[in-house]
Image (cartoon, grey):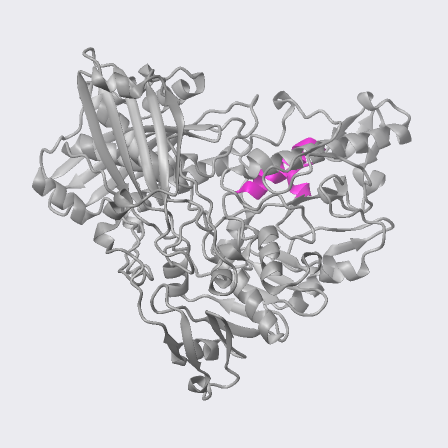
Amino acid sequence: MNMNEISNIARRDFFKTTGALVISIALPGSIESALSQSPSGKPPLLPDELDSWIAILPNGNATAYFGKMDMGQGVDVAVQQIVAEELDLAFERVNVIMGDTALTCNQGGASGSTGLQMGGMALRNAAAEARRVLVERAAQKLGVAADQLRVENGVVMSGSQRITYSDLIGGQYFHHKLEWNKQYGNPLKVQGKATLKKPSEYKVVGKPFPQAVITEKVMGRQKFITDITVPGMVHARVVRPLNAGCALVAVDENSIKHIASARVVREQNFLAVVADKEWDAVRASEALKVKWSPQCNPFPPMATLHDYIRKASFTKKETPVNRGDVDEAFKTAAKTIVAEYEWPLQSHASMGPACAIADMNGDTPRLWTGSQKPHYGRSGCARITGIPLEKMRSTWVPGPGSYGRNEAGDCAADAALISKAIGKPVRLQYMRHDATAWDPKGPAGVYRGRAALDAAGNVAAYDFFAKGFTRQDVATTEADPKDTLAGQFTRFAPKGTLIFQIPAEAYTFENKRCGWETIPAMLERGSPLRTGHFRDPLGPETHFASESFIDEVAAAANADPVAFRLKYLTRERDVAVIKAAAQKANWKSNERGSRGKGNLMRGRGFAYTERNGTVVALVAEVEVERKTGRVWAKKFWCAHDCGQIINPGTILTVIEGNIVQAISRTLLEEVKFDQNQVLSVDWATYPILELADTPESIEIALIDRPEMSPQGAGEPSHRTVPAAIANAIFDATGIRMRKVPITPQRMREALARA
């Protein structure tokens, strides 16, 4: 889409009135013409201004300004429902604008399951306050007490008297203050004097409104980051080191002289090529002759990765849970159970490689990005280019998507650096190998469980320990160039945040200890194996180990896996979810799987966990083919309690997506590398789940708790899948699979050893 086309659309869809100019549709970049015509008097874009959150158009419709964005999970639809509910407007009369730093406050970008849990609550409070203000204004005009008025679809009424939102404020600003906690990002909170609606009063919240964007995508009408063009822009490609850790020694710029308009952009170890035509940029990146420093072998042999983790010194160590006297309890144990589990490095391998458009020149520097973090990306690009932050504008445009910190943030920083260097707008499109090989990786780790049983089969002590690479070697926010490849290849020294995880559960073992250690990065600067946030950071890894181990302890105690868990849980929500999943799956404690009999072995497995207030339990049914080693995760039954449900339809699809992606991570995904480079560079070398291997069925029981706030559904069910599959494999084969991915080859080898 050409920016001139966008401006023409904008002129048709903006309304200029006596008090304000507000938006009726949201298009990337569509505000340009409006800003130049906007009348004075608009309050500053600050969280304590109601106008920063809600606008009422001349026709009485509303626009909500959401400082996060939706990455395909329907958060925008839920926000639309929340705002419509509190404003007493029909769902169709609310529009949501997301992720533009010129239009929205920084609410932290898309951050897993916090879209509604944190970001949506600010919009709910703002919408409720907007309604309160409008009703009070109506009361003054109609001469009726505010508590005697009612609102239906934007019309304030008392008997035969009525006045519309359009009459009260349409096209004008509120000029009304909110209370603000003076924080940006995920913690940002605002509220007014309004009382929120009671769940019994809901007309919109709780209903399954569809995602209109799905139709746009299916019909090919959706505009993506790759469709954005800017007049005068050139095309760019980055050139990464052939071997990790190698410095840039020399570049032969004459090697691309035969390609029209092609030129080299270099700053220290950062290298790129630009050209007027995209194919010329691709050709130049392949033809450019570069001399790198000799190989430095920064990585251990892949086969020894987990031994490397075991032997590595720790950078940080914590024991968040330490109850009772674990060591003393082990001394008198009737039976001790010990097991170790291994999780690999994994890649985002997004559907398409990242793209970004940057124009870092002139008075209005611009960035268009598919990143989850446009506000923070703006900060990072301003820092790496030296441009004052207040001049910069960043606009989120839908891209291939990601669940966590993929390569989109790196692409934005690269594009900004190139644009600043050449003085022109730049469109940078990564190639597939740039994305899959060089995106931040989900961290690898080793997990050890120990449990002591007394003579009656009760758990006397439980000890769980995790060790691996930090989940924030590069931070998720992209606000600091040190967390991008462009920054690390130039002048910004990396500095990771040392953080790992223990299991999220509520087992009431009297003597219980859970701890973790992080280890140093294998390569400190510019590493294709640097680790960062992946969907549900460290959730699948940790709970693959912990819930597999709980199953092993239950087996050692000769107890049913469901009954064993219930024995050590007291929280009502946990118990309710586990019982709901078991009921949904028709779980029977006296039934067992094939246990290794026959060529096609079947079994069921159970897992339970919690994440940020959401509780999930999952039953998996698998088939294991002895001859091929193929594991088919055939059926799933899930019980899910995420507090108040805004849109049950989108929650169902999100849970299904969580389960399918987690199956892929459990059975297939593992980054391959040698001592100098990543070898997983595409879907041939980094296979993901294909259609033939998706489940036959996924059945979901949603537990709605309208008295609670929404707790988030974007990630919790993801973390239950690996252990449920592994436990089902044990039920089918009698074999414990303690290493992910559980590939056909590993399954065959395990069966051969049995």
The prevailing secondary structure element of the residues shown in magenta is helix
Residue nearer the viewer, 697 or 86? 86
Name the quadrant containing residue 1. Answer: bottom right
Say whether residue 232 is left or right of residue 703. Answer: right
- Percent position of residue 561, x then y: 26, 22
Residue nearer the viewer, 223 or 317? 317
Which residue occupies the extreme bottom position in the image? 258
**Residue 730: within the magenta?**
no
Is residue 138 shown above or below 531? above
Residue nearer the viewer, 316 or 37? 316
For image coordinates 51% across by 78% down, the residue present is: 277
Say whether residue 347 is left or right of residue 161. Answer: left
Regarding residue 219, the answer to whether it shows in the image is: no
For image coordinates 54% across by 46% down, the residue present is: 70
Is residue 7 shown above or below 462? below
Is residue 61 shown above or below 396? above
Name the quadrant containing residue 537. Answer: top left
Residue nearer the viewer, 478 or 628? 478
- Which range of residues does the magenta coloring cover? 74-94
- Percent position of residue 447, x then y: 29, 36
Name the quadrant containing residue 66. Answer: top right
For image coordinates 56% across by 30% down, the residue present is: 206
Regarding residue 479, the answer to whether it shows in the image is: yes
- Percent position of residue 683, x then y: 32, 59
Is residue 249 shown above or below 600? below
Say whether residue 361 is left or right of residue 633. Answer: right
